[in-house]
Image (spheres, helix red, strand yellow):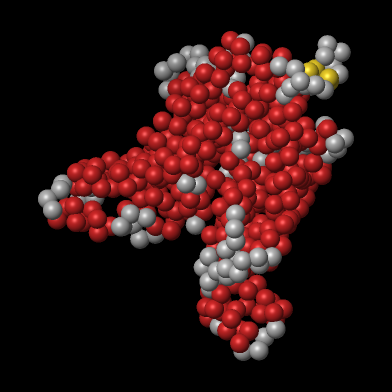
Amino acid sequence: MTATARGDRRPWVLLTPALTAVTLLLVIPACFIVVYSFWLRTGTGAEQAGFYLDNWREVLTDPFYRDILGQTLRIAGISTLVCALLGYMPAYFIAYTRFRHRAYLLLLLMLPFWISYIIRTMSWISILGVSGAVNALLQWLGIIDEPLQMLYNEPSVILGLVHFLLPFMILNIYVSLDGIDRSLTDAAKSLGCTGWQAFREVTLPLSLPGLAAGCLLCFVLGAGTYITPMILGGPTDAMFANLVYEAIITQLNWPLGSALSLVLLALLGGLVAIYTRYLGIDQIAKSFR
Amino acid sequence: MKDTGLGWSTIRLATIVVCLFMFAPVAVVMLLSFNSSQFGSFPMEGLSLRWFVELWHNDAIVRAFQTSLVLGALTSMISTTIGVLASMAMVRYDFPGKRLVSTALVAPILVPEVVLAVALLLFLQFLSVPKSFPLLLAGHVIFTLPFVVLVVQARLVGIRREYEDAARSLGANPLQTFREVTLPLMLPAVLAGMLFSFTISFDDITGTLFWKPGGVETVPTQIFAMLRNSISPEINALGTVMVLITVALPLTGAALARRLAARMRGR
C-alpha cells in the first residue's frame, strides 16, 4: 500500500507545511536559546551579545540550583513510582475484565484526559484546604476542633502530580496488556503454573514495555511542570521549571532563563533519547490507536 | 490471576478506589459550584445557580472564554490541516529519511513544554515579534501538531489504497476520487484530529502563561489568576462549565464519528 518510487516528490510536498512549522517554531528557536545562554544581562537590564560563561557558571555551580534540581527529581520520581503502583491494577482490570460494557470502562479511562489540568489541580484545594471537604467532615464529626493544614507542602504537590499523571500511566500499561496474546497465559497454566505464577512469569514481563513507557512519560511530564507547585506547593516547594518561569517572566533575565531551560532539556530530553534508542518511540505512539 | 477469586476482588477494589481518587475531587468542585453561600467551600448552605449567573456577568471571564474559543478553533484548523497532510505522507509513502521526519513531527512533545515555550518566546522576541495573539497561536499550533499527527496517522493506516484504485479504474478522475472516496473515509480521522487539538489548546496553561500578552487571558490562565486571590464560588462554576465543555465535545465527536462510520458501512 505504500508507493516506493525513489525521488518521488509528493511526500515532501505534503510534509512541507509541517516540517516548516517544526523548523521555524521549534528547531531554530531551540538553537537560538543555546546562543542566547552565552549572552549576558548587564546591571542596567540591557543584554550584551557575546560569549560569556557567567550564566552557565551560575547554573552549574550555585548550590541553590542544584538543590532545586534534586528536589525536582525527587518529586517527579516519587510521583512516578506512586503512579506505577496505583496504575497497574486498574489497567489490568480494564484489560482482562469480562464485564459486558468494557467500552464504558475505556471511556472512563480517557475521561480524565478531557478534564482540564488546572481544574483537576485546583480541585484539591476544595478537598484538603482549610475549609475543604476533609476538614469540614472531620470537624462535623467532632474529631478535630481546628482545621488541619494539609496543603502547600511537598506531599500535596506529589498528590497533585499523581492525580495529573496517573491516566498516562494506566493508558500505557493498558495498551501493552491488551496486546498480550491470551493463549500464552493459558499455555502457562496448562503446563502447571498457578494464576499468580502465570502472571509473574508471562503477563508481567510482557507488560514491562508499557510500564516503562508510562514511567518515562510520567517522569518527564512531572519534572517539567511548574503549575502544580505554584498552586499546591508552599514557598519552598519550587521545581526546576519554576526557576525558568521566574527567570523569564518575573526577572526578565532571558540569558539565565535560556541556560536553565537547556539544563532541563538536557536532562529530560536525554532520558527520552535513551529510551527511544533502546525501546523505540512506538510504545508511546501505540496509546493513540 | 482471574481464577483466584481473592486476587481479582483486590484488583476490582483497587480499580474502584482509583476511580474515586480520579473523579471525586472534580465532583466536589462541581457540587460546590451550586452552593448558595458566598464562600466557595463547605458547608453547603443551599442549592443555587447564582454563581453561574455571576459568571455570565463577569466581563473578564466572558472575554477569556471568547479568547479560548477563537484560539482553540484557529489552532485546531491550522494544526489539523498541516497534520493531516503530513500524516498522509507518512502513511502513504516510503521515502529516505522517514524515521528522522517521524521523530521531527513528534519532537514538540518530546521537548518539555516549558523549554518549547521559552525557546519560541525568546526567538520571536528577538525577531521583534511582541507577545501577541499570533505568537500564542503559533505556540498552540506547534504544541498540538504532534498529537494530531499521532491520532490521524493511527486512523489513516486503516484506509486501504485499493478503494481509491477501484474508483480510479471505474473512471473517476483524481479530484472525484478524493472527494467521493478518500475524504469520506478520512473524515473520522480529521474530526478526531480537530477535536484533539481543540481540547489540548483549550486546556493549555503551561505554554500559554509564557506566550500570552499582558491583559489577554484564556480560561485556564484566568482561573490561575483567580486562584491567586481566593477560591470564590465563581471559580467552581467556571470549572464546572469548562469540564462540561471539554467532556461533552469529545463525546459528541465520538458519537458523530460512529454515526458516520455506520452510515458508510450501510452504503
In terms of image quadrants, where is residue B112?
A: top right
Q: Is residue A230 above or below residue A107?
A: above
Please name the residue shown 20% across and 43% down the image. A196
Q: Please provide percent x and percent y for residue A3.
A: 58, 70
Q: How many numbered badges does the structure rendering display?
A: 0
Please name the residue shown 69% across and 31% down the image. B224
Front residue of this view, candidates B247 and B57:
B247
Does B238 sit left or right of A127 as displayed? right
Res. A266 in view: yes
Does A36 sit left or right of A133 as displayed? right
Please name the residue shown 54% across and 22% down the image. A72
Spot the residue most to the front.
A6
Please name the residue shown 18% across and 52% down the image. A188
Does B251 sit left or right of B8 as displayed? right
Q: Please provide percent x and percent y for residue A287.
A: 48, 51
Does B200 sit left or right of A287 as displayed? right
Q: Please provide percent x and percent y for residue A92.
A: 34, 47
Spot the residue most to the left.
A192
Q: Please provide percent x and percent y for residue B215.
A: 83, 33
Image quadrant containing the C terminus of chain B: bottom right
Res. B76 in view: no
Front residue of this view, candidates B206 and B171:
B171
